[in-house]
Image (tube, helix red, strand yellow):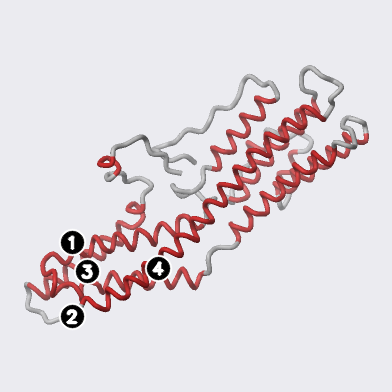
Amino acid sequence: MIVLEQRTWWRQLWVWHGTALERIWARLVLVTVASTLLTLMQTEWGVSVVVLTPLPFTLVSVAIGIFLGFRNSASYDRFWEGRKLWGELVNAARTWARQVHVLVDAEAGGAPTARQHELVLGAVAFTHLLRAHLRDEADAADAGACLPSEVAPAVLGARHRPNAALLWLGEHLRVARLDRGVDPLHVPMLEATLGVFTNVMGACERIKSTPLPASYSVLIHRIVAVYVFSLPLGLVDVTGSLTPAVVLFIAYAFLGLDAIGDELENPFGFDANDLPLSAISRNIEIDLRSALGEEQLPSPILPVRRVLR
């Protein structure tokens, strides 16, 4: 996610890293070169080319604007829903830590017990494993460090690692209930929080595994490409030698909007504008380790070149 400093309007005009321009500059160069060649052929070299009136392009631009607006709105809805789900995960993790502290091994008092440590850090492991699962990351060392040594190989070797972590937490609760580490009346409360973890995981998987229809995305790409490359044919008789500049400006608008829709469609990836899952996971770990009374906490993840991962 791009983290912009408090900038003036003028300075924001020159931001490059993480913007749509970084993704589409090669396309803009190609469109501008093609537009320049056509303009020179028509105005300087005396080569006759087929020209059109601006009317067809005016009509098509309205349709393209509607399509792009709808697609970007749908992509942003996916991005915002993903952010709300990870916000819900933050709250559920904090609730879990509080419930474990109050309801599990409640008679012991004082410093957190070994069981409380394992249950709280198990939620941290689940958070790291969910992030890795959504990003298709094989490395899960940060999650393994939060699991007991006898449990880590089975959880990390499972086909669905975050679900395996939740299964282990549920089994841990069952054992705690049997040896009276938790009152049976309190087990449904803890299970309800595990249910929130499961619901967040399933909703995130739904977003990741159900992209916008490919036929719709391909159609938008094709229409935008045909429009910006043929646009000089409708402008050269009106704008003359300024045609490349006018085409460049219009192409930047349409290609930029098209690229933004692509980038927001999967909010869990590694693009500059995707959700900062690593930073959120680290913040959850810091909060839950702090709840356990640990003093040596991991450092928060900071933006690198204004990008927070």
Amino acid at dot 1: Ala
| Label 4 vs label 2, nearer the camera | 4
Q: Position of residue 227 (x, y in %)?
A: 30, 72
Q: Residue furthest top?
A: 110
What separation in Å lies between label 1 and label 2 (alpha carbons)? 18 Å
**Crowd tier of the residue under label 1, counting other residues whose Cα lies within 10 Å: few below 14, some 14–19, many 20 or above:** some
Residue receiving disc 2: 51
Earlier in the chain: of badge 1 and badge 4, it is 4
Q: Are marks 4 and 2 in contact (CB under 8 Å)?
A: no
Mark linked to residue 66 = 4
Residue drawn at x 20%, y 79% as measured from the top left: 53
Left or right: residue 109 versus residue 223 is: right
* Residue 298 in the image: above or below residue 152: above
Pick whichever, 61 or 233, lies toward us: 61
Q: How many marks?
A: 4
Amino acid at dot 2: Val
**Crowd tier of the residue under label 3, counting other residues whose Cα lies within 10 Å: few below 14, some 14–19, many 20 or above:** some
Residue receiving disc 1: 245
What separation in Å lies between label 1 and label 3 (alpha carbons)? 12 Å
| Label 4 vs label 3, nearer the camera | 4
| Label 1 vs label 3, nearer the camera | 1
Q: Position of residue 297 (x, y in %)?
A: 60, 24
Q: Are marks 1 and 3 in contact (CB under 8 Å)?
A: no
Q: Position of residue 254 (x, y in %)?
A: 33, 63
What separation in Å lies between label 4 and label 2 (alpha carbons)? 26 Å
What separation in Å lies between label 2 and label 3 (alpha carbons)? 15 Å
Earlier in the chain: of badge 2 and badge 3, it is 3
Residue receiving disc 3: 34
Earlier in the chain: of badge 4 and badge 2, it is 2
